[in-house]
Image (tube, grey):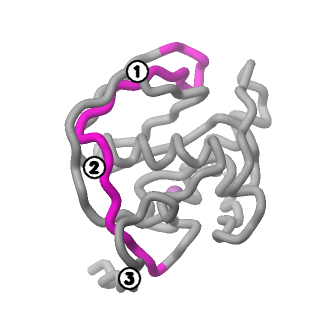
Amino acid sequence: MALRTIRIQGDPVLTKKCREITEITPKIRELIGDMLETMYDANGVGLAGPQVGVLRRLVVIDIGDGPIVMINPRILETEGEQTGDEGCLSLPGKAGCVTRPNYVKARAYDENMEEFEIEGTELLARAICHELDHLDGHMYTEKVEGALHEVTYEEEK
Ligand code: NI
């Protein structure tokens, strides 16, 4: 596994629509491992293909409960609303207020191309919506209410 370079907003790759993955090739398997490693290294809770320059429908998420790999994900249901700060590894040091559903049910394939459904509320619902937007070339800044603000992260002890 290896760290990949995280693309920063302004890079055109972040505005493109991604293609579906049809089979798990060694290259896709390597990409999944690299994306997880890159996300953990950057202390992120999610990362999508375009953020490492790969226009495929693949996201990884970990809100602290273990890694979730979602291939060709789609949202089946949403419910409610939550409004709160959101950030993105493609826009380091910034955050902004975004309203998202408070509940999301999604379907995707895992790293073995087994189909699964996932339900999430709060942070997980937010992360799923945020990462899936990347697959269609969208960033949270298009949905932000008010101005972006600077964020500083406390050093981990
Ligand atoms: Ni993001």
Magenta stretch: includes residue 97: yes
Mark 1 Cβ inside 8 Å of ligand 1: no
Query: Image check: 72 left or right of 13?
Result: left
Q: Earlier in the sequence, mark 3 or mark 2?
A: 2
Q: Label 1 vs label 2: CA separation?
A: 18 Å
The magenta stretch spans which residues? 93-115
Sequence-wise, the earlier of marks 1 and 2 is 1
Cα separation, mark 3 vs mark 2, equals 19 Å
The residue beneath circle 2 is 123
The residue at 65%/65% (across/down) is 6
Instruction: Give the residue drawn at x 61%, y 37%.
Output: 58
Residue 155 higher or lower than 136, as above or below: below
Type of amino acid at the residue the image marks with label 1: Leu
Q: Quadrant of residue 37?
A: bottom right
| In the rendered image, the vertical position of residue 108 relative to residue 92, given as above or below | above
Residue 91 % position (x, y): 54, 72
* Horizontal and vertical percent position of residue 113: 60, 17
Residue 3's x, y, as percent? 66, 61
- Confirm or deny contact between disc 1 and disc 3 (CB under 8 A): no
Q: Is mark 2 within 8 Å of ligand 1?
A: no
Image vertical order of residue 71 relative to residue 126, above or below: above
| Three-letter code for the amino acid on which mark 3 is drawn | His
Query: Does the residue at mark 1 contact the one at mark 2 (Cβ under 8 Å)?
Result: no
